[in-house]
Image (cartoon, rainbow, N blue to C red):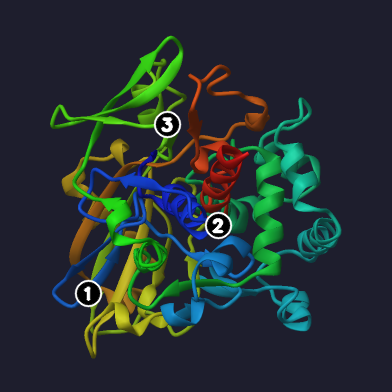
Amino acid sequence: MIVIVGAGLAGLACARELSRVGRPFLLLEAAPGPGGRQRTTHRDGFTLDHGFQVVLSSYTAVANLVDIHNLNPRRFESGALMSHDDRLHHLTSPLANPITALFSPSLPFSDKSRLAALGLQLLTTTDSTLLAGCASSSDMTTASFLKRAGFSNHFMNRFARPFFGGVFLDNDLETSAGLFRLYLKRFLTGTAWLPSGGISALPRAIASKIPVECLRYNTRVASLEISNGTATGVHLGNETFLPASKVILAVDEPSACALLSRPAPPTGRSVAVIYFKTQSSLYKHPCLVLPDAPDPVVRHFVQITNIAPSYAPLDWHLVSATVLTPERYPPETLPQLAEGEITTIFPHAIGELEHLETLHVPYAVPSHPPGFAARIPFPKLPANVYTAGDWTGGASIQTALESGLHAARRLMK
């Protein structure tokens, strides 16, 4: 029997592939349902995702595993509202609307020219080449790459840090420049969308294609049984032993290290998302708002009901604000600080925002410094053990799904 540990995206993709070819397996998940870090809470008619997460249409693995139409995707506009000097500037994608993008006052012309040139270069570069750059000894931080490429401080503060800082959960843009280039290409070639039922609808859709008898929720794996360097099974939290011919650890890297009795990995990145409800709309565009304050509490925010009206009851709007490294602030002050920054940009919302929920995600994504892809987390795994997860090649939905598919295919060889 093949045992898969973890029903996040990687574990679900692995299980789906094994199911497709008729290999027997058992998928074990400690939580009551599938999804891992892709979680959604429903409260008083509002849909609250645990962290601001979106799917990109350029994520090919998603379309290969689920019927996207059944998820009723709600699409973002390819652009953003940039806040600067008490004004909002609308930045549009140069591929979606080149004329508007060219003449928009959102960024200096020189920055837009450099961004267009970089985009054209990336469109002619394969994903595998970009990923190889993440393992190169010449890889550098995203901030260093952008400065070396000649981008201005305006570009860094108005767009790069608010947008990609929010993507990487990295305010200082210390993330691999190779990974930045890969993400930029995916944003240029795809549009962002959300399932109308919340981000957890995606893992639930994958799980629905897996035989029910192969899934066990509320089942925690406590340890592996290793005999003479070979995995022979898993010990469950209730002290039950489950024999296994192969074990796939489709969990986050800290959990994999714990199960393999290895030292803890580099610290991942945390995030908090603060939700407000309001009956007074902040703005109309279906896109993010990017503040450019020097040291903001809110990295970016969005009136999510502009994209997915189903996230709130009728006549209500839902605002989602992303806070990086939330442990820097006393938890009780976060809603007030976030509200203050949002209403500075939209003064008409003063007194209109009602704090609904603050959701903390202590381990949201792994850290990906320059050259991260050259690191081999587990150089010598026990025989019959395989790993999968978004930490293997750049945190994204696409990476998580691909890692699960690749683990299944390696095992079947």
Q: Residue 59 carries which label?
A: none
What quarter of the picture does the C terminus occupy? top right
- Nearest the camera: 195 or 332? 195
Q: Which residue lies furthest to the top in this view?
A: 228
**Residue 104 vs residue 150: left or right?**
left
Residue 75 in view here: no
- Hey, which quadrant is residue 335 in on the image? bottom left
At label 2, counting other C-alpha atoms closer than 10 Å, the crowd grade (few under 14, some 14-19, many 20 or more) is many
In the picture, measured across the screen, residue 77 lies left or right of residue 270, that is right
User: How far is disc 3 from disc 2 in space, using C-alphas?
Assistant: 45 Å
The kind of residue on which mark 1 rests is Phe
Q: Nearer the viewer, residue 373 or 248?
A: 248
Q: The residue tagged with tag 1: helix, strand or loop?
A: strand
Which is closer to the viewer, label 1 or label 3? Answer: 3
Amino acid tagged 3: Ser
Pointer 2: what residue?
163
Mark sitting earlier along the chain (3/2): 2
**Secondary element at tag 3:** loop
Few, some or many residues within 10 Å of mark 3 (<14, 14–19, 20+): some
Residue sitting at x 70%, y 68%: 189
Q: Residue sitting at 34 percent across and 47 percent down?
A: 27
Q: How far apart are marks 1 and 2 (CA)?
A: 25 Å
User: In x, y percent, where is residue 352?
Assistant: 22, 77
Q: In the image, which disc is placed on residue 245?
A: 3
Q: Can residue 46 be seen in this view?
A: yes
Amino acid found under the numbered disc labelled 2? Phe
Viewed as shown, does residue 335 lie left or right of 253?
Answer: left
Cα distance in 3D space between marks 1 and 3? 44 Å
Give above or below for 293 relative to 56: above
